[in-house]
Image: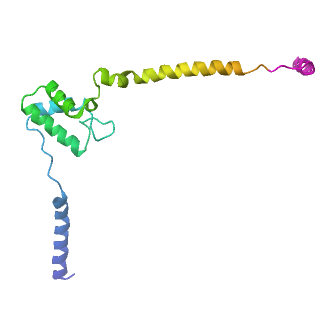
């Protein structure tokens, strides 16, 4: 290999080593205060990500979840209590942001709806089964069929004994 081709190969290797650093993103800033970060994580585990399907705010990777976590950190730096922060989020996004929404008239259906539908389903099932029982007629055997059945039974008992 010539000296020129060795220089080209070295340059190519150097560029290949530098490319991943160019694609790398800057790490997301973590809260300077570990206590705030711990408190934010504890609070965000009880909050729902508004973008993701049934994922907590703490576990979500969505950009909107990052924005909400940043908002929570800012409010914690402003010395707001967890209740004040949750009240702020509920006022802005409604009870949907809570994993355990409070029992109030607007959430009654959410809390008791499944039991209501279960009760209605059980009542409908009982009514259906009673009507079906009344529709089923006991098959009546003719005298000839009854005698034939009795003879078959006697015959089978005789074979078993």
Q: Magenta stretch: dominant SS?
A: helix
Name the quadrant containing residue 139.
top right
Quarter of the figure with the N terminus: bottom left
Q: Quadrant of residue 66?
A: top left
Which stretch is magenta?
A: 139-161
User: Which is more toward the observer, 142 or 47?
Assistant: 142
Query: Which residue is at the front of the view, 25 or 2?
Result: 25
Splitting the image into 4 quarters, where does residue 23 fall? bottom left
Residue drawn 77% across and 19% down? 138
Left or right: residue 157 versus residue 47 is: right
Q: Residue furthest front?
A: 105
Where is residue 93 drawn, in percent x and y? 23, 34
Q: Residue at x 33, y 39 (%)?
A: 53
Residue 145 counted in the magenta span? yes
> In the image, 135: left or right of 141?
left
Q: Is residue 128 above or below residue 8?
A: above
Q: Residue at x 18, y 64 (%)?
A: 19
């Amino acid at each position: 290999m010539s000296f020129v081709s060795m220089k080209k190969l070295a340059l190519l290797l150097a560029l290949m080593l530098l490319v991943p650093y160019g694609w790398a993103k800057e790490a997301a800033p973590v809260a300077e205060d570990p206590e705030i970060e711990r408190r934010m994580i504890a609070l965000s585990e009880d909050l729902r990500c508004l973008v993701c399907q049934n994922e907590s705010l703490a576990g979500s990777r969505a950009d909107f979840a990052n924005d909400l976590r940043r908002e929570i950190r800012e409010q914690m730096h402003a010395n707001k209590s967890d209740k004040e922060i949750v009240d702020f989020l509920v006022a802005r996004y409604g009870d949907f942001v809570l994993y355990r929404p409070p029992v109030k008239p607007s959430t009654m259906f959410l809390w008791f709806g499944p039991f209501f539908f279960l009760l209605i389903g059980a009542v409908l099932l009982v009514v259906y089964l009673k009507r079906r029982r009344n529709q089923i007629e006991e098959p009546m055997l003719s005298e000839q069929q009854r005698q034939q059945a009795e003879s078959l039974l006697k015959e089978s008992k005789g074979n078993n004994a």
